[in-house]
Image (cartoon, rainbow, N blue to C red):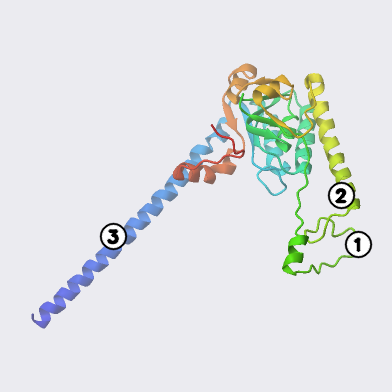
Amino acid sequence: MSDDKLLKNIVDSLIEERKSDKKFKFLTRSIFFVFILFLVVSIILSSTDNINQTNKHVAVVEVTGMISSAGPVNPDVILPHIQNAVKNDNCVGVILKINSPGGSATQSKIIFDEIKKIRLKTDKKIYAVIDDVGASGGYYIAASADQIFSSSSSIVGSIGVRLDSFNVSRLMDKLGVDSQTLSSGKDKTMLDPFSPLTPEHRIHLERLLKNIHNQFIQDIESSRGDKITQDVFTGLFWTGIEAKRIGLIDDLLSTYDVSEKFFNNNPLIVYNKEKDIVKELLNSTLNTSNTIFGIKY
């Protein structure tokens, strides 16, 4: 093969390689552009609820997940949506769609207290609908509504308070590991996992939990009144059917049932839907599902 022909073959090969690189770059950029376009369109479509707030509707505020100051359910996340709904003249009422196993006692009480205050300032009804689970702090929030509803298979109740800690002092003794924690107060190391709980500390913690539990009980009793027919403050939880029988909920109704029965079947608009746009896209793309309470059919 002549040098000229060999050079031409090399040049042609390089040109073809460059073309392949360009095609690959074009393909990857196209895929990326389509994904971004899909994301933008999805956000626009999911935001149409905000546009529809100019028409008569029922506001749905989702209370989903663990309750904590930095978690998906806390006063700063939930209360502004309820306040916006109440202030919106086109909103005929509010449904709290609850799916929470509980969490922070303090955050739960703050939300409970603030919703009760909102109810005093408006004629609009606020109803709670328990989805999969409304337990402990989740039920606490539900109790702030005018009425509580759930499905027949929902998990309801768990009105109690708990404090979790571990003690590994005996394990550390076996391993020959000593704790070197320093403190300026004799009670500062209470619940230190490397030290046993003293009888005095146990009494103090039990008194603290009882105090918080009593606040929980008082708020539920003030909310439910004489509807409760038995002791429901032991930490037990029930199905929706049982919860109705003992007065923890008012009826077995879904979000759609509540809209039809109390709000003339006006459209439902989720006020805090935009918070979960990315999560919803990922869930739909990967076809995954999450359950808060581990009970399934």
Tell me the residue at 78%/69% (across/down).
178
Where is residue 27? Give x, y as percent.
Answer: 32, 56
Give the number of the mark in front: 1 or 2: 2
Where is residue 228? Give x, y as percent.
Answer: 78, 22
Task: State if disc 3 and disc 1 touch (CB < 8 Å).
Answer: no
Circle 1 residues within 10 Å: few <14, some 14–19, many ≥20: few
Could you say which quadrant of the image residue 2 lies in? bottom left
Q: Residue furthest front?
A: 174
Tag 2 residue: 202
Q: Marks 1/3: CA distance?
A: 70 Å
Q: Nearer the viewer, residue 90 or 34?
A: 34
On residue 185, the disc is 1
Q: Is residue 54 above or below residue 38?
A: above
Q: Marks 1/2: CA distance?
A: 17 Å
Instruction: Tell me which numbered mark, 1 or 3, is placed earlier along the sequence.
Output: 3
Could you say which quadrant of the image residue 145 lies in? top right
Q: Marks 2/3: CA distance?
A: 70 Å
Tag 3 residue: 23
